[in-house]
Amino acid sequence: MLFTLYICLLWLSTSGLWTIQAKDPDTDMSMRNPHRHLAPNNVDFAFTLYKHLVASAPGKNVFISPVSISTALAMLSLGARGYTREQLLQGLGFNLTEMSEAEIHQGFRHLHHLLRESNTTLEMTMGNAMFLDHSLELLESFSADTKHYYELEALNADFQDWAGASRQINEYIRNKTQGKIVDLFSEQDSSAMLILINYIFFKGTWAHSFNLESTREDNFYVNETTTVKVSMMFQSSTIKYLNDSVLPCQLVQLDYTGNETVFFVLPVKGKMDTVIAMLSRDTIQRWSKSLTNSLVDLYIPKVSISGGYDLGGIMGDMGIADLLNNRTQFSGITQEALPKVSKVVHKATLQLDERGLESAARTQVHRNSAPEPLTIRFDRPFVVMIFDDFTWSSLFLGKVVNPT
């Protein structure tokens, strides 16, 4: 029997400083403290995973949702036993002598609640689902714990009829993500008997939209020998900007109408690896404090990129090696023995467009009475990072090498 973990996500279109403000009047101190400890670990794991993926795919686009990967692996640990369970949690960056397993899972439960409930201005759907063959039965303890902490929905499927099972799963994900994730399973056959899915659908609105009429076809310089045509969006407005004196890059911070904030980072030519190597919590906090409001003529590609990864090898590099070998112990999931997790697959999609709450009418700035704007063109490889500043979560991390 094979156990496949699919982490499926979508982020559509594109607030704030990084602060931990997990304020919930219905939540007592014991519930808030795990969340405070959870956030730094999740962010550190996010950057570690991101750097591994970038290093493993030089010259390629990379796009992931770290908070979804952390959530899915933490949930999976509830069904692991022995050293496998310890590996999963330690691989996520948790020190079990400082934070108990109960606190970790309570922290994820609180995080999930905050991400769903703290912002009513966004469309966000998050969830976890498990499809298992009719011949399998979940252990009561695993079913109760995953439902309590992660709101896992368990559904039966006939995996002897893979075509029918894949249609069932695809339809479920399509409905949950408002039709934006379709045909998750495209292979003709599979020997899987149990599939765990984590999904997130997120559709945001820029606080200040790009000027729709100003979008033009333009060049994007992939490298010294490759140039592609892209639809380049434009806005001229006062935005948060930094020409970093420490790292070889410029960056802007754009806001959604809610708690989400987006960093677009433009490394100096040839310095992408240098910038990525230095990404950390400290770097983001330094940027947040150093950004200043500046009048900017901003050009960003209207982009759609996807990332799909079998994370098994990467997890091994990060100390979670038992996921893919025969010593793996996942006897805490079903009544019947599951010998190993065969795949840890993550899929994510990014789309950027012009839509916003307010029109960027400030493109009509009177130049004779205002300082000349800075011009920043994201017309070569860049980094994009999306954070929820209410929960201090890394929603998405991306490296855009070729937007086409």
Image (tube, rainbow, N blue to C red):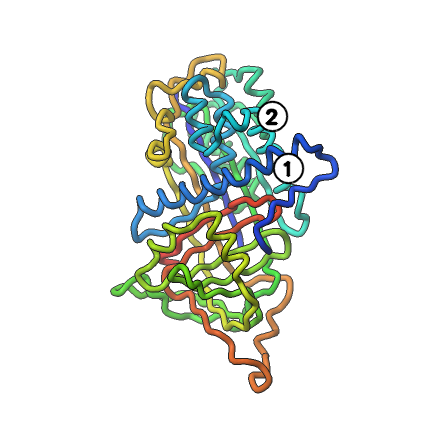
Q: In the shown orientation, is residue 370 left or right of residue 53?
A: right
Q: Is residue 404 visible?
A: no
How far apart marks 1 and 2 lie (CA) works out to 13 Å
Give percent across and percent down for residue 249. Answer: 40, 62
Circle 1: residue type: His
Query: Residue 84's image quarter?
Result: top left
Q: Which residue is mark 2?
A: 147
Q: In the shown orientation, is residue 57 left or right of residue 365?
A: left
| Residue nearest the viewer, comparing 212 with 145 | 145
SS at badge 2: helix
Circle 2: residue type: Lys
Q: In the shown orientation, is residue 80 left or right of residue 18?
A: left
Sequence-wise, the earlier of marks 1 and 2 is 1
SS at badge 1: helix
Q: Farthest residue in the left direction?
A: 225
Instruction: Find residue 113 and name its label.
Output: 1
Give percent across and percent down for residue 404. Answer: 38, 58
x 57%, y 33%: residue: 108
